[in-house]
Image (cartoon, rainbow, N blue to C red):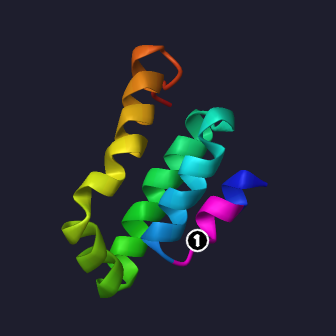
């Protein structure tokens, strides 16, 4: 359910808000969905890309969460 909500986010802000709100229950699949959706949103709508470029620090929590999951061995290659 959270994965589909992540994929349906209309803006990067909404996506990052969902990550922040559900962070404690997200696994590597959810993190992958966040990064994939982030790229698609930035590519699809120029205003999303512009917002992201002006608010790069908004990615800090997602980057940190992903790095921690990788260090803990929770993320593997397919």
Q: Position of residue 60 (x, y in %)?
A: 33, 44
Q: Position of residue 56 (x, y in %)?
A: 24, 58
Magenta stretch: residue 68 in it? no
Image mark count? 1
**Residue at (53% x, 21% y) in the render:** 74
Q: Which residues are magenta?
A: 5-10
Q: Quadrant of the N terminus?
A: bottom right
Task: Kindly state the secondary structure of the residue where label 1 is placed.
Answer: loop
Whether 8 is drawn above or below 60: the answer is below
**Residue at (28% x, 68% y) in the render:** 52
In this image, 47 relative to 68: left or right?
Answer: left
Q: Residue furthest bottom?
A: 46
In this image, 55 relative to 12: left or right?
Answer: left
Whether 57 is drawn above or below 53: the answer is above
**Residue at (55% x, 50% y) in the render:** 19
- The residue beneath circle 1 is 9
Residue 3 is drawn in which quadrant?
bottom right
Q: Residue furthest top?
A: 72
């Amino acid at each position: 359910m959270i994965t589909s909500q992540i994929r349906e986010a209309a803006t990067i802000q909404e996506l990052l808000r969902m990550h922040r709100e559900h962070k404690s229950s997200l696994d590597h699949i959810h993190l992958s969905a966040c990064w994939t959706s982030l790229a698609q949103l930035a590519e699809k709508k120029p205003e999303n890309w512009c917002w992201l470029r002006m608010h790069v620090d908004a990615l800090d929590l997602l980057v940190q969460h992903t790095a921690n999951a990788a260090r803990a061995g929770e993320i593997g290659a397919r």
